[in-house]
Image (cartoon, rainbow, N blue to C red):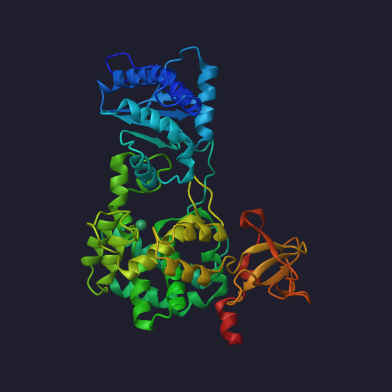
Amino acid sequence: MTTVSDTDPIDAPALLRGFVSLRWLARMYPSGHPVIAQKLDELYALAQAHLQQHDKLTIDVIRGEVHLDGAASRDDGTAPATAQATRELAALGVDSLHISAGVERDEIRLAAQFLDYVKENASVETLERRLAAQGITHINFGRIVPLDTRWRARQWPDAPTSPLDPIYAQSLVAAEQAFETVASGGTLDAVTVRDLVQLLIGEVVRSNAALGQILALKEYENLTYCHSVNVAILSLLLARQLGLDDATTFVLVEAALLHDIGKTRVPLEIVKKPGALTRAERKLIEAHTTFGAEILMETPGLNPIAPVVALEHHRELREGGYPDLGQGVAPHAMSQIVSVADCYEAMTGARTYREPLRPEQACLVLARQAGTKFNTALVKAFVAAVTFFPLGSLVRTSCDELGVVVRTNPSDPLHPVLGLITDDFERLLGEVDTSVRDREGAYERQIVSTLPPREHALDLTKLLPSSASLARSA
Ligand SMILES: [Fe+2]
């Protein structure tokens, strides 16, 4: 066993077990009951024993084993009871418990009661805020994902592995080069950026196959340059939906393409770190906004909106997010657009520690945060632009048919036109319009489920018309 200090470490498993039993006791007895008071005394004393020597007490459960401040705890012979407690905590979405010096006795009781609500909204920032709203400022929970996550998480490829629409592939190569230049200390070339923006506006957005690949769930770790190209295209779709003029759209797409350029100044191992971030690491990640603004301000030839969007794209509509820009400062309209596109893209992309969300699920998350995190009008426009069933979605209908969304019905976004395909995904059988109704006015068929792409070997480029064939048919 490794000790964490020159004094004996506290019994961390006992603290965890006590915390879990306090949750049960708080359900059964009023807060002032002696049983609660006794359990609180016990937990408070344990926590204080550690906090007298250290600023912070961190307990992590890694593969079922309890760690105190990063060191495995001693085996106290009560493993089954500890295992039960750690299982209960894991089911509640909690793998780590942080208590800092200054903790009050009653905060421990409130935190134990809060355990039932941790899962509701798992983001780190939101959780801290929600705890603070309950008066809990010295205790925090986390779903830690140990550095070695291979035992529990999928290893995603770094970049797309399936065949890409050629124009989309070309834009990814150009973006990768631009980002690489900045990462290696070079200067961003505004002319290269302009060419790329023109490629996105002129070609990529006209390719159904490319759009299908951008909108769909993505089974690869979304490296910054892929993410940036996708966010630029999604912002462009939103601009079209909003009816922005060409000059404004150009400025928006340029800003969207460069919004995360500051990540080139954050070490990749932190950007990609699967585990819980330390406070210092989180600060460094958050600093990609200010780094980005700095880089873009130093780049001649860019529109002055680009650094503004880089700075503000993690600001929420109502005062949350980062960096802190002072009270009452609403993000620029373009930052608000990029922030919707950014969030959708991040949710539909894979991360080492979580599966990507399907497009319609990501749209629902955006809808839930409309009005607080995002501008409601922009979320509505975005969902209308991408639709719940984006081009390229693979779906099953109520008639047990397998189909690919090939066109959307603007007046009825939940009922797109499908290209029906054979179960081996090889052949297109013909098109059906799911918005068609029968004599009673009921839909002839409904989409009953969407299928994640990894369950099949679907090559979208074979089934969707490419920009070239679109141009021919125009
Ligand atoms: Fe960002």
Q: Please state the horizontal and vertical placement of residue 105, each as a whole percent of the image.
A: 32, 25
Q: Please state the horizontal and vertical placement of residue 150, each as a whole percent of the image.
A: 52, 38
Q: Please state the horizontal and vertical placement of residue 442, each as a whole percent of the image.
A: 74, 71
Decide: is 11 above or below 229: above
Q: Nearer the viewer, residue 72 or 436?
A: 436
Would residue 73 be visible to someone looking at this image?
no
* Residue 409 location, quadrant: bottom right
- How many circles with numbers are drawn on the protein? 0
Q: Please state the horizontal and vertical placement of residue 72, each as a whole percent of the image.
A: 41, 22
Q: Nearer the viewer, residue 107 or 168?
A: 107
Decide: is 398 above or below 74: below
* Residue depicted at 55% across the width and 57% down the height: 361
Which image quarter has ligand 1? bottom left
Decide: is 271 above or below 227: above
Quadrant where the C terminus sits is bottom right
Would residue 240 be visible to someone looking at this image?
yes
* Residue depicted at 73% across the width and 69% down the height: 420
Quadrant where the N terminus sits is top left
Q: Which residue is most to the top?
A: 77
Q: Is residue 233 rendered to the left or right of residue 417? A: left
* Residue depicted at 36% across the width and 46% down the height: 125
